[in-house]
Image: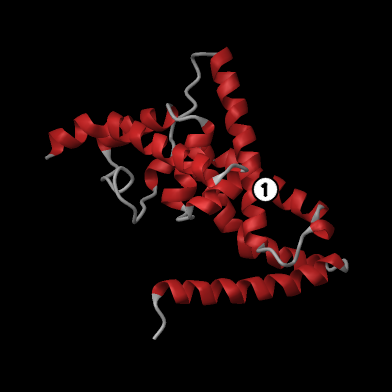
């Protein structure tokens, strides 16, 4: 019997083979083939962008722009790579651009609240605290404020590692940095969140 990780690996391998077939047809001008790729990957991309940007409208923009860029660059895609990972990298970079632009706007207009209704709070992960904490009421408010204190790189690294379940090496590739730098970003994010939430956790015990 296959283990959970082996089963996921088998599913991913089958998806990559299916992706390759669709990519070949899309490169030949088959619009329906590219639509298959969009349908296959759009939900995962939206989830990623939603957690990173904290905005449904921004997440929709990220998905649309990601597939637009992928379509334009389809001829340059290296078929030895994972198509899903390639899309994630495009989406991550564009999400980072949006987050940095939002921070700049917030600095220019201090009254704006870039973390309002942050959807990252509605997601749970199987990883250790703080992201496994019960996200409700007072905890939601404090976590929203704590997430806003993270830099764009820290928030992205945290989401990719603790929500998307990526390895440190994968996070580094997404951020375009060495694994050591990615690990440091994740560590800083976790430390900041723990410090911010520690008073509430201690009270709840």
Question: Image height check: is 196 above or below 3?
Answer: above
Is 164 located above or below residue 16 in the figure?
Answer: above
Above or below — where is 28 with respect to 180? below
Residue 118 occupies quadrant: top left
- Residue at point 61% right, 52% down? 88
The location of residue 108, given as percent across then percent down, is 58, 13
The reply, left or right, for residue 163 in relation to residue 49 is left
Q: How is the image coloured?
A: secondary structure
Which residue is situated farthest in the bottom direction here? 1
Nearer to us in this view, 32 or 186: 186
Q: Quadrant of the C terminus?
A: top left
The structure residue drawn at horizontal position 47% and vertical position 37%, both measured from the top left corner, is 185
86 left or right of 114 in image: right
- Under circle 1, the secondary element is helix
The picture quadrant where one finds residue 78 is bottom right
Residue situated in front as seen by the camera: 12 or 55: 12
Can residue 60 be seen by looking at this rendering? Answer: no
Residue 145 quadrant: top left
Report x, y in % for residue 44: 55, 57
Question: Which of these two is toward me, 136 or 81?
Answer: 81
Query: Compared to 119, does 78 lie above or below?
Result: below
Place of residue 16 in the rendered image (x, y in percent of width and height, measured from the top left): 64, 71
Q: Residue at x 47, y 23 (%)?
A: 113
Residue 115, percent across and down?
45, 30
Q: Pointer 1: what residue?
A: 90
- Report whether 151 appears left or right of 42: left
Q: Quadrant of the N terminus?
A: bottom left
Q: Residues within 10 Å of mark 1 (few under 14, many from 20)?
A: some
85 sits to left or right of 135: right
Q: Is residue 159 visible?
A: yes
């Amino acid at each position: 019997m296959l283990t959970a990780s082996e089963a996921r690996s088998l599913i991913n391998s089958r998806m990559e083979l299916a992706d390759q077939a669709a990519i070949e047809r899309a490169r030949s001008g088959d619009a329906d083939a590219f639509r298959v790729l969009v349908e296959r990957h759009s939900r995962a991309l939206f989830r990623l962008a939603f957690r990173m940007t904290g905005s449904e409208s921004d997440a929709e923009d990220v998905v649309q722009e990601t597939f637009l860029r992928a379509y334009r660059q389809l001829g340059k895609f290296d078929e030895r790579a994972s198509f899903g990972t390639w899309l994630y990298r495009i989406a991550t970079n564009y999400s980072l651009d949006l987050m940095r632009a939002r921070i700049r706007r917030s600095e220019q207009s201090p009254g704006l609240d870039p973390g309002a209704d942050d959807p990252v709070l509605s997601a749970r992960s199987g990883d250790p605290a703080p992201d496994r904490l019960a996200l409700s009421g007072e905890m939601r408010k404090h976590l929203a404020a704590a997430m806003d204190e993270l830099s764009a790189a820290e928030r992205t690294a945290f989401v990719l590692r603790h929500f998307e379940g990526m390895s440190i090496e994968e996070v580094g590739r997404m951020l375009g940095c060495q694994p050591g730098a990615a690990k440091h970003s994740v560590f800083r994010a976790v430390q900041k969140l723990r410090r911010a939430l520690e008073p509430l956790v201690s009270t709840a015990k």
